Amino acid sequence: MAGHRWRLARAAVLAAVFVCAACGLVYELALVALGSYLIGDTVGQASIVLGVMVFAMGVGALAAKPLQSRAAAAFAAVELLLALLGGLSVLLLYAAFAWLDLYGPALVATAFVLGLLIGAEIPLLMVLLQRIREQSAGSAVADLFAADYVGALLGGLAFPFLLIPVFGQLRGALVVGAVNAVAGLALVFTVFRRDLGPRAKAGLTAGAVAVILCLGYAYLVAEDFEVTARQQLYRDPVVHAERSRYQEIVLTRSVARGGQPDLRLFLNGDLQFSSLDEYRYHEALVHPVLTGRRGSVLVLGAGDGLAVREVLRYPDVSAVTVVELDPAVVALARAEPALRALNGDAFADPRVRLLHTDAFGWLRTAAERFDAVIVDLPDPDETATAKLYSVEFYALVRQVLAPGARIVVQAGSPYFAPRSYWCIEASIRAAGFAVTPYHVDVPSFGDWGFLLAGPGPGAPPLELPAGAPPLRFLDANTLALAANFPPDRARLDVPASTLLQPRVLEYARAEWRGY
């Protein structure tokens, strides 16, 4: 009978290790994911979170030494604190970002305290395991670490495939915090209840009630909090907001001074267009590349449908293939009445074929050939998008060009981010293209640049197609001036960006910092 009880108690400790490890890894992943959404620097955010937390775990393991004499009560207290801070971590950091502009310091502080508490778990659990039945240090460590690592696997898989889809990032962290609290307290109040004095039991019970009430209240108000915090980040009223698998999508609407409605789309906080002047951007992007043959057009990105709208104005365009990673952006462009009116319901046109996949991966296996390619992708200020501005990417684009075809690339601002702009130009040239740089004024963005390119020795001329439809902004004189760069924004001799050396990412982060 004693042996049976020992095995059950030992299994209970290892189960607690398993659950606590899963919760700890979810907290880490939640901080990394939140940083990638809000800041955009996935590698940098992961490095900060993991580096700080691993360091703090070592400190926490040392700090747990004096607590080993009261291991059961100390472990329960650690789990309650960890559940409270871990569960509220996303909410608190989002608030720091939205209202206080203190996200960086708050992230470091949160990661450190979480790491401190996680680091204290294993030494205390080791003591509790040995109290059940003493065993060799090697065997005890092996048992604990096995349960810890398997639990971490569960947490790593549950975060993207269960918690985010079902609960969302904010509520997902709160749910994990509740699970964390229940697992820790269940172990102490069952297996080690005799190790607790009356005062410890009363204190832990009161603490558990307070933590569960706090997490439960936060869960109930999470949606209202997120709406309020999100609105704090945007000047205009938010009319649509969602977090897709890839990014946060926000649509705002206001009335400009002239009485015109101003519809704006933001992806991860970055402005994609304003309805007041988007025609300037899209006319400059699309029409110069459609000179010559344009029967089959490939559009990479442009899930809002605005570039596709301009392409479809040519009756001799027979097919438009749109490769857009995020189906949620296209779904919004198809469903939101104001956005549908703006894009002319472009995705309903039978000439349009939609592919929801990664542009880089799709180009590697594409067998089709296109008369024109429009590259309208998010700026290269994140690790995920930097590869779409590399020499290797443009070499893949070249493989899908029909004879005489050309490409155009939106390349950011030659005024605000000149090194980024000319790095993209250098990357396209390194892939075997001759390039014609040009730029126009888009009031919502400022001075904005594009790159028209074609394979071959001569740079393609910058001109409007014969028989172009009536345009609001672009004409022959405007386009001729667009190829001129003033002395303070002359060409910079910068190296190309590659997959292994994403220089454009470094330039973009440095140049856009503060804007």
Image (tube, rainbow, N blue to C red):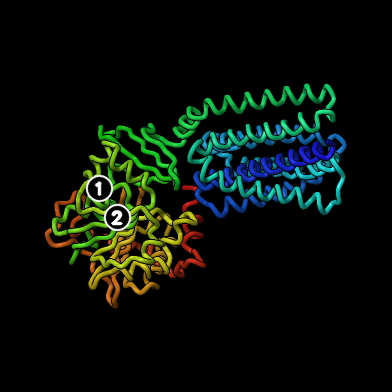
Distance in Å between CA atoms under marks 2 and 1: 9 Å
How many C-alpha atoms fall within 10 Å of the one at disc 1: few (<14), some, or many (≥20)? Answer: many
Quarter where residue 202 is shown: top right
- Residue at 52 percent of width and 29 percent of height: 222
SS of the residue at dot 2?
Answer: strand
- Residue at 40 percent of width and 62 percent of height: 360
Locate residue 344 relative to residue 451 in the image: left or right.
Answer: left
Q: Is residue 382 above or below residue 169?
A: below
Quarter where residue 351 is shown: bottom left
Amino acid type at circle 1 is Phe
- Residue at 24 percent of width and 45 percent of height: 343
Q: x, y (%) of residue 477?
A: 19, 59
How many C-alpha atoms fall within 10 Å of the one at disc 2: few (<14), some, or many (≥20)? Answer: many
Tag shown at residue 366: none
Q: Is residue 163 above or below residue 44?
A: above
Q: Check if mark 2's residue and mark 1's residue have beta carbons within 8 Å.
A: yes
> Is residue 179 or residue 129 the one in the foreground?
129
Quarter where residue 271 is shown: top left
Locate residue 318 relative to residue 169 in the image: left or right.
Answer: left
Q: Is residue 312 above or below residue 269?
A: below
- Residue at 57 percent of width and 43 percent of height: 30
Q: x, y (%) of residue 446?
A: 35, 50
Q: Residue furthest left?
A: 467
Q: Is residue 484 visible?
A: no
Q: Is residue 406 above or below residue 468?
A: below
Residue for badge 1: 347
> Is residue 380 or residue 161 the one in the foreground?
161
Residue for badge 2: 322
Amino acid type at circle 2 is Val
First in sequence: mark 2 or mark 1? 2
SS of the residue at dot 1?
Answer: helix
Q: x, y (%) of residue 171?
A: 54, 34
